[in-house]
Amino acid sequence: MFEQVALNLPQSICNEFRLAINRGSWENGVTLTEYHRKICEQVLFYREDINYLTCRLQ
């Protein structure tokens, strides 16, 4: 389930996750919790791993 959701997120959401991790807060100024940070990181790592593997297999 997590994998499907992570792969189907729009790139704009992933960009927001990256920005939130870097800033330590969401675009609206709300502080990024440790739980949110971990989820954002997991999504980004998973997507990057899949993209890496896909490129390597081609």
Image (cartoon, rainbow, N blue to C red):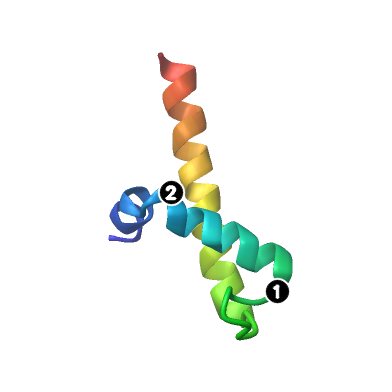
Question: Does the CB distance between marks 1 and 2 fall below 8 Å?
Answer: no
Q: Which mark is residue 11?
A: 2
Q: Which residue, given by chain and number where applicable, does mark 1 sit on?
A: 24
Q: Farthest residue in the bottom direction?
A: 30
- Dot placed on the residue nearer the N-terminal end, 1 or 2: 2
- Name the residue located 31 percent from the left edge and 51 percent from the top edge: 8
* Image quadrant in which you'd find residue 25: bottom right
Task: From the viewer's side, name the closer residue of 27 and 48.
Answer: 27
Can you say whether 9 is above or below 27 in the image?
A: above
Query: Which image quarter is the C terminus in?
Result: top left
Q: Say what amino acid the circle numbered 2 marks.
A: Gln
Residues at marks 1 and 2, CA–CA distance in whole angstroms:
20 Å
Q: Helix, strand, or loop for circle 2?
A: helix
- Name the residue located 63 percent from the left edge and 83 percent from the top edge: 29
Horizontally, residue 35 falls left or right of residue 13, namely right
Can you say whether 49 is above or below 44 in the image?
A: above
x then y, percent, for residue 16: 53, 61
x then y, percent, for residue 23: 72, 69
Horizontally, residue 15 falls left or right of residue 33, namely left
